[in-house]
Amino acid sequence: MNLDSKTPAGALGDKWTDYKAKMPLVAPNNKRRLDVIVIGTGLAGASAAATMGELGYNVKAFTFHDSPRRAHSIAAQGGINAAKNYQNDGDSVYRLFYDTIKGGDYRSRESNVHRLAEVSADIIDQCVAQGVPFAREYGGLLENRSFGGVQVSRTFYARGQTGQQLLIGAYSALSRQISTGKVTMYNRHEMMDLVMVDGKARGIIARNLLTGELERHSAHCVVLATGGYGNVFYLSTNAMGSNVTAAWRAVKKGALMANPCFTQIHPTCIPVSGDYQSKLTLMSESLRNDGRVWVPKKKEDAAAIREGKKTALDIAEGDRDYYLERRYPAFGNLVPRDVASRAAKVACDEGNGVAPTGLAVYLDFASAIQRYGKSAAHSQGLDESDQALIKKLGKEVVAEKYGNLFEMYEKISGENPYKFPMKIYPAVHYTMGGLWVDYNLQTNVEGLFALGECNFSDHGANRLGASALMQGLADGYFVIPYTIGTFLSEEIRTPQIANDTPEFIKAEKETADRINSLASSNGSQSVESFHRRLGKIMWEYCGMSRNADGLTKGRKMIRELREEFYKDVFVPGDADEYNPELEKALRVADFLEHGELMILDALDRAESCGGHFREEYVTEDGEARRNDADFTYVSAWEWDDNDPKLHKEELVFDNVELKTRSYK
Amino acid sequence: MKWNRILDISFSRTPSIYINMKLTLKVWRQKNSKAKGELESYQVEASEHMSFLEMMDVLNEQLIVEKKSPIAFDHDCREGICGSCSMTINGSPHGPQTGTTTCQLHMRKFKDGDTIVVEPWRSGVFPVVRDLTVDRSAFDRIIQSGGYISVNTGQAPDGNAIPIEKDLASNAFDAAACIGCGACVAACPNGSAMLFTAAKVSHLNQLPQGEVEKTRRTASMVAQMDKEGFGMCSNVGACEAECPKEISIEHIARMNRDYVASIFGGRKS
């Protein structure tokens, strides 16, 4: 298979502008006759559906939630990057492009990433116009902060709820199009299959989750914006409902899954506290602007803390190891996520972890409270030597910046983070891998597009903080509305797609059979228990670090688990009713296949890069050892029940020199 | 530094579940919107570190093992932001802790031996789908009636073109923090959706970007709210008390002002 990225010719900085100027257009009278299906209503899906509605296409949008506003984009905390250079600190489109390529450990496509950086500034303008209440300075202008892996402040934010505010912006734009009738919204509908007609994606089979009824929906093309697959690990920061099903159904119809092993483990999450735990909660990376990460230097201190005999406050300054500042002086606590996560793991593996499990490190705000307190006292003309006053003022500043995160931490952990440092540990957060797409965001299946976290295109082997929101909105507002024209301009003579053709009838029948067989399975184990076991396999063998033996073993275990699942799962209730357990069963069934593909990909990639860390490939000082000679490619997998096939898209770097990624 | 075979399957090294509570749960069970519902009693063992929903997970696991029908409830992010969870716990929407959604409520707020009554949101406009799951689509329709600024993609001026006072942006944010859960309606003896509607109206009407459509937006959203069948506001204030995002009823006052203006003083009513 020839994987043509369809990257336009020309200089990197001119590609997108020239391409837009010359691309085929669809006239307004023809847009009215073209139907587009959008699956998912997170940042990417809602912005795409709204914008395509504005342009005049007939859009049908689907979400499994009860409202489009519930999509998991809503939980993003920290912010959104944009190359505005409002801070005059040397930022530019090129620098955002370069940081993203480097942060992704040179495993993403130059042209796509540069376009992302180019449209980033427009996103901020659009969101402000929609009424997104971004943080502002006293002068009324937009405020910025810094995030991991960069040395400029280009992150725009709305307290610790940036994702919520951006999603509400996109949701309101979507609602406006729903009210005009340009978008028809299907809530509580889940995509069960992709329907192909003459080699093109022409519709879906959806399940009405309230009634269990299967519906055939046809369109000229299908856009997937269904997020990532982090829940394959069971415990992750993803919402409970996040799943791989829509993307996986596309894979089963021939779409390629790219770089599935590239998963992001976020360094600052609230540690696991018990077996019953259903999900993990992220503490925004923005906290690393002000929080200092440390563990006790002495193992006996760490042990005493684990046993509850000491607290963090008992450890003298000289007995603390601020290991990120020590190992990476140039970036300190703001190293990228993959680097910070592995460093936390090393600290805990060496026996210096805190918390009863030994799997936690401290994130300490004491110095920030001091620093802000002094500055506030100074500017208000108060006594700078009064320690109690300084602490009080400092806490107020910290509360203003991170108040809601501190509250959330206290609710979950039961501990006051203004007094004791937070305990954090890495957790699965984001998946860089996803459906393979070309420059137009079209998959290898004609008429099937993928946006946002659902595709693989922009983050390489590691995503920088505050870039997921940027990518979701870039794809939805500013890329797909243009690039979809490259496909639809060829379809203006195609009449409305009928949904009673043999292709639709067959797809519906297959879906019904699959659902009925699961719904009638009367084994002895719950869906949840299988999902937990899958998560354990994935975390142990395909988690923060991987090796060939473990991966081989993991693959075997997943295959066995899959077999056991179909033999012994118990799904209560019926297929023709509202049945959340059945929904879960269908999603776990797809995770059980997708997980195997992740392992295969991790096995193939015999190098360490970004979030993919192979224990066999490390440098002398324990850092990841990338292998550009053999692995500068995107792996794109074609699924097969027995032997999935690997296709490669060689990555060409015309503008960036491949270097060892150093944050020292 | 060595990268030995990892043993950090975090859940396997965690202490095994520490059960320190035995609870009686009385949960509303209702097959569908047409069926008659009733409270059923269950015994469940929990740990104080669990979230309320994790305790419900344990109960459901128990029911599934017994091949009984698990309790249906909406939930997703479990971080207090998606607005999916919707349980009335001992008569309070989202339970006893102020400023907290059900998913962020932890069992340490309850005592060993407690009896806990769990019901869905109670409102005629939110029909029960099943058990604790309700239909809140009326909220979407209110937003569709005007809860937006009419700006197409690509029409926006530079983000810094209009400076917005820090406090004003902050006030607008306080209103925009609404998660659309519906606790305000469930808390209100009149079943009014004023706090939800006012939060959106106030968020947008305060900002210079949203001012242009202020009159039309307010009139249209209030009309839709009435059309859905939500009750009138009689300034009880239960909505503010139960709102997990602590949204102030001051926003209702602002909406009322804008509403009156839309009727009597509006440029285009």
Image: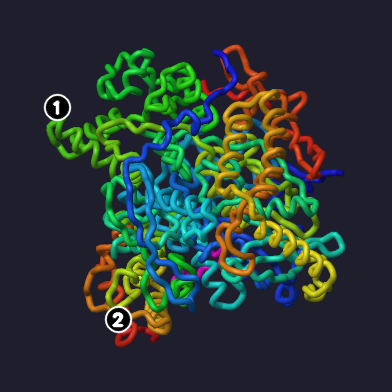
Characterize the magenta stretch by its predominant secondary structure. loop
Q: Nearer the viewer, mark 1 or mark 2?
A: 2
Task: Name the residue type under label 2.
Answer: Met
Q: Is residue A647 visible?
A: no
**A106 sits to left or right of B51:** right
Asked whether B64 or A267 is in front, the reply is B64
Q: Residues within 10 Å of mark 2 (few under 14, many from 20)?
A: some
Q: Is residue A61 magenta?
A: no
Question: Which residue, given by chain and number where applicable, does mark 1 sit on?
Answer: A385
**A507 sits to left or right of B141:** right
> Where, by quadrant of the figure, is residue A200 drawn?
bottom right
Task: Name the residue type under label 1.
Answer: Ser
Q: Disc 2 on helix, strand or loop? A: loop
Q: What segment carries the magenta color?
A: B147-155
Asked whether A368 or A94 is in front, the reply is A368
Q: CA distance from mark 1 to mark 2?
A: 56 Å
Q: Position of residue A167 (x, y in %)?
A: 49, 58
Mark 1 and mark 2, same subunit? no
> Where, by quadrant of the figure, is residue A246 drawn?
bottom right
Q: Disc 1 on helix, strand or loop? A: loop
Query: Eyeballing the image, is A225 above or below B40?
Result: above
Query: Residue at 18% across / 35% down in the picture?
Result: A377
Question: Which residue, given by chain and number where applicable, does mark 2 sit on?
Answer: B232
**A303 sits to left or right of A246:** left
Marks 1 & 2, CB-CB < 8 Å contact: no
Query: Residue at 46% across / 46% down in the picture?
Result: A79
Numbered disc 2: what chain? B
